[in-house]
Amino acid sequence: MISSFHLFGQEIHIYGLAWFLGIFIAAIIAILICKRRTIERYDIVYSAIYAVIAGAVGAKLLFIAVTIEPILGSGLPFSAVLKGGFVFYGGLIGGALGLFIYTKQFRLKFLPFADIYAVVLPLGHAIGRMGCLFAGCCYGMPYNGPLAITYYDTAGNVPFGVPLFPIQALEAFLLLLLFALNLLIYLRGKKSGTTSAVYLICYSILRFVLEIFRGDGIRGISAGLSTSQWISIILFCFGTVAVIYTKIKKSVCIEE
């Protein structure tokens, strides 16, 4: 499994390329569908700047939080923590905060924007996860079954010569299904907040289960669950409460 290739004499790392393409393609689709919620295209572009910057900060901060103890405990310098990767959930939370700040700053409604991001985020995430597959990060547990992946040369910290569960590819596939589901819901013009709630519920379940098949140890374990599993539980509850609230509010409006 290669982690980079050369183009015009320059080394291109597949991990970074995949995440860049994921963000770019997701942004293009968001621009194409935003008019259905009467959102201007320039607002999608500018809000994406807020979301991407805040997301990058959040992803790095959560990575530091879950890795600083084991990395420093192994005798490596603090610079090793800073040079490390990112944690998706930190990016999700940071990106949502950045989007919220943008909508509040320009007095826009948050939920219509959140719905658009909930549609395209799984697609961008799926492409980015394929970058993880080539980079050798976020790898699966030892596994000798069908479609097992064995690394022999990569930039990540994946164990070499050990057949592993293809967790990155599986997550990418499931994220594509979630993208298709939320796009269908969005195009059908469901109430604001619907696609956001569906995303939170579906991805939190997906991620909680997939964490069981992960093999990378530096993920922050507490009470037998990883940091991502704890966050998944919180987001699932949040999404479920949002759905229940919407149903109750709709029922009250009908009765009135």
Image: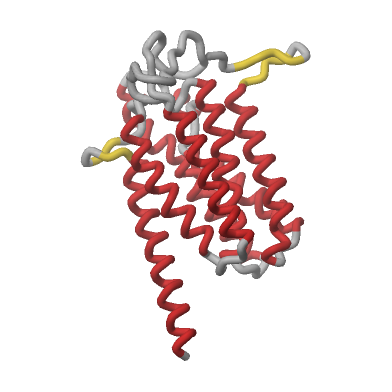
In this rendering, position of residue 193 left or right of residue 255: right
In this rendering, position of residue 134 left or right of residue 203: right
In this rendering, position of residue 183 left or right of residue 61: right
Q: Quadrant of residue 227?
A: top left
Q: Is residue 64 above or below residue 150?
A: below
Q: Is residue 26 above or below residue 106?
A: above
Q: Nearer the viewer, residue 79 or 31?
A: 31
Q: Is residue 99 above or below residue 77?
A: below
Question: Do we see residue 23 in this rendering?
Answer: yes
What x and y, as percent, mark residue 191?
Answer: 56, 69
Q: Residue furthest left?
A: 223
Q: Nearer the viewer, residue 41 or 251?
A: 251
What x and y, as percent, mark residue 230?
Answer: 32, 46
Identified at 68% across, 51% down, the residue is 30
Identified at 74% across, 15% down, the residue is 7
Identified at 72% across, 52% down, the residue is 31
What x and y, as percent, mark residue 133?
Answer: 51, 24
Question: Do we see residue 114 in this rendering?
Answer: no
Q: Residue furthest bottom?
A: 256
Image coloring type:
secondary structure
Q: Quadrant of residue 148?
A: top left
What x and y, as percent, mark residue 93?
Answer: 48, 50
Identified at 45% across, 23% down, the residue is 80
